[in-house]
């Protein structure tokens, strides 16, 4: 068995849950925050039999879109007085960041 940990954008999360559950996958949704943008995203935990992994990955790839977002990072102020001014940069986020882990045991009590 495998555990898929998929970090997706909030905008894609509901459609992805619907698509996965419609194909019979069990899904747990976690509200998470990206370390770089410090903005909300969604992490889905999906436990799958190994022979269903590629189908689940295809669904994730199909549903999740990449989007541009503006991140505001501090940049040092000129003049050398040690202050910082916000500096907007554009980053491309997603579609999905996916980790696949081996599951040692799976039990429901
Ligand atoms: P964030 O950390 O908020 O990152 C959002 C997007 O900002 C990233 O999109 C990437 O395009 C950009 N970015 C991240 N770190 C950067 C840096 N040091 N310099 C410049 N740009 C940077 P994605 O790569 O699609 O990642 C989306 C979210 O997936 C991330 O949100 C984070 O929550 C998660 N993630 C990505 N890689 C990860 C990893 N290796 N381990 C754990 N979580 C990860």
Image (cartoon, helix red, strand yellow):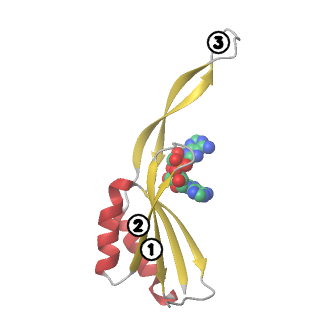
Classify residue 63 as left or right of residue 43.
left
Q: Is 85 located above or below residue 99 in the figure? A: above
Percent of width and height locating residue 58? 40, 73
Badge 1 residue CB within 8 Å of ligand 1: no
Between circles 3 and 2, the one closer to the viewer is: 3
**Residue found 36% across the figure and 61% down from its top:** 13
Between circles 1 and 3, the one closer to the viewer is: 3
- Nearer the observer, 55 or 82: 82
Residue identified by numbered label 2: 61
Task: Answer whether labels 2 and 1 touch (C-beta < 8 Å).
Answer: yes
Badge 3 element: loop
Q: Earlier in the sequence, mark 3 or mark 2?
A: 2
Q: Residue 57 got which mark?
A: 1
Crowd class of label 1 (few under 14; some 14 to 19; many from 20; radius 10 Å):
some
Residue identified by numbered label 3: 78
Q: Residue 96 got which mark?
A: none
User: Marks 1 and 3, Cα distance to the nearest angstrom?
Assistant: 47 Å
């Amino acid at each position: 068995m495998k555990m898929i940990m998929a970090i997706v954008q909030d905008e894609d999360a509901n459609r992805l849950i619907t698509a996965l559950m419609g194909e019979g996958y069990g899904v747990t949704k976690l509200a998470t925050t990206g370390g770089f943008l410090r903005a909300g995203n969604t992490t889905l935990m999906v436990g799958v039999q190994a022979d269903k992994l590629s189908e689940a990955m295809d669904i994730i790839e199909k549903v999740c879109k990449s989007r541009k977002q503006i991140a505001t990072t501090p940049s040092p102020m000129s003049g050398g007085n040690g202050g910082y001014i916000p500096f907007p940069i554009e980053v491309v986020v997603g579609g999905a960041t996916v980790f696949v882990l081996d599951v040692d045991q799976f039990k429901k009590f």
